[in-house]
Image (tube, rainbow, N blue to C red):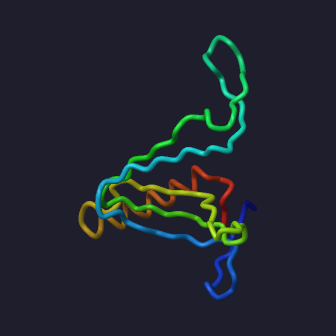
């Protein structure tokens, strides 16, 4: 993923699209990647070991009702089975749980913070 983006029309064959959504109920999301190779630290005292596919930790996220979920989908890396790759996810918990004014402020602040925490994505 390159470090900058340019906004284009949906008809201009974009590299990425952003999919915003708001869950209607509390959700618990799980991700477990079976084909992952990486280094891991078995415990703090014994150094590095090798992490084999199928033995990496489960990743979970909790998304509350009224949260803002944004997924950045890679449209240039579609698999042979038409599966899309999500390269970036933003969850702003509780962004839409108050008045319209406070919702807007929380949502904008959360999105801005997501970009601050992701310096590799810049306009």
Q: Quadrant of the N terminus?
A: bottom right
List the single residue furthest toward the bottom. 11
List the single residue furthest toward the left. 99
Above or below for 41 versus 28:
above
Query: In the figure, is residue 2 to the left or right of 109?
Result: right
Number of labels in the image equals 0
Query: In the figure, is residue 100 to the left or right of 44?
Result: left
Percent of width and height locating residue 89:
54, 57
Above or below for 38 versus 16:
above
Above or below for 58 versus 42:
below
List the single residue furthest toward the right. 2
The residue drawn where x is 70% and y is 73% is 15
Query: In the figure, is residue 43 to the left or right of 37?
Result: left
Percent of width and height locating residue 60:
46, 43
The residue drawn where x is 67% and y is 37% is 53
Image quadrant assignment for residue 84: bottom right
The residue drawn where x is 68% and y is 44% is 35
List the single residue furthest toward the top. 45
Image quadrant assignment for residue 92: bottom left
Percent of width and height locating residue 66:
31, 61
Percent of width and height locating residue 38:
71, 35
The residue drawn where x is 61% and y is 33% is 55
Q: Quadrant of the C terminus?
A: bottom right
- In the foreground, 56 or 69: 56
- In the foreground, 24 or 58: 58
């Amino acid at each position: 993923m390159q470090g900058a983006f340019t906004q284009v029309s949906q008809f201009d064959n974009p590299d990425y699209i952003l999919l915003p959504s708001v869950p209607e109920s509390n959700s618990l999301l799980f991700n477990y990647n079976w084909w992952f190779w990486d280094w891991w630290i078995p415990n703090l005292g014994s150094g590095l070991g090798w992490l084999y596919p199928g033995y990496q930790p489960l990743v979970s996220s909790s998304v509350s009702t009224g949260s803002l979920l944004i997924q950045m989908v890679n449209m240039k890396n579609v698999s042979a089975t038409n599966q899309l790759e999500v390269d970036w996810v933003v969850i702003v918990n509780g962004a839409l749980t108050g008045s319209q004014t406070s919702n807007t402020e929380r949502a904008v602040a959360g999105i801005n913070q997501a970009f601050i925490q992701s310096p590799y994505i810049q306009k």
